[in-house]
Amino acid sequence: MPSNDVRILIQAAVPTAAVGAVAVAVGGAVKGGQGAIGAVIGAVLVILLMGTGLYVLQWIARSIPHLFQAMGMMMYLTQILLIFVFIALFKDTTLFHPQAFALSLLVSTLTWVTAQARATMKAKTYYVDPEPAAAGNTAEAKEASGRQP
């Protein structure tokens, strides 16, 4: 993973983890141990799904750039479906408090999206790959030699 991609991942994951820690403290204070566990699970689920999605999308952008937008939509759909599957599997659990889980999931997701958007805007990533200077000079040399008799 290029350093620019790692920087975006870190700049999105760190604020999300901080918000998750606050959610754990609030969940623990309001709903006890079950609230804290629910908040931890919500924050960790967001960091895992969003981090994996970002990694996969960066890989797709480098290897299959013409499918990037379609794969981005598929990635977000897959993430939402995985969250729905997780919720369906644990809908009647007593392991964690569902409201603390839901609020932590929501706040962590909003934090991740905001932090990733901010990091991407500040990254100054090229929209196109610049041509190497040597290749440009070679093309110019060929044109110049073709013009002279």
Image (spheres, grey):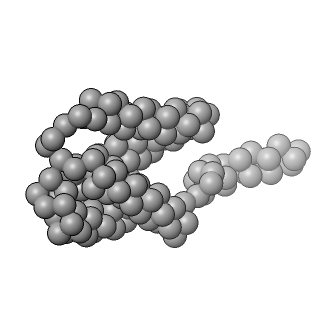
- Rendered location of residue 28, percent (x, y): 16, 64
Image-quadrant location for residue 133: bottom right
Q: Position of residue 38 (x, y in %)?
A: 21, 51
Towards the viewer: 98 or 145: 98
**Left or right position of 147 against 9:** right
User: In the image, what residue occupies the spot 24% across and 56% down?
Assistant: 39
Q: Residue at x 14, y 43 (%)?
A: 95
Residue at 45 percent of width and 59 percent of height: 110
Q: Quadrant of the C terminus?
A: top right
Of residue 3 and residue 143, the one placed in the foreground of this image is 3
The residue located at (19%, 57%) in the rendering is 35
Residue 13 in the image, given as x and y percentages of width and height: 32, 60
Q: Looking at the rendering, which quadrant does residue 92 occupy?
A: top left
Res 43 visible: no
Q: Is residue 119 visible?
A: yes
- The number of callouts visible is 0
Closer to us: 77 or 94:
94
Q: Nearer the viewer, residue 66 or 16?
A: 16
Q: Quadrant of residue 87?
A: top left
Check the image and report above or below for 90 versus 6: above
Question: x, y (%) of residue 131?
Answer: 62, 52
Q: Residue furthest left?
A: 33
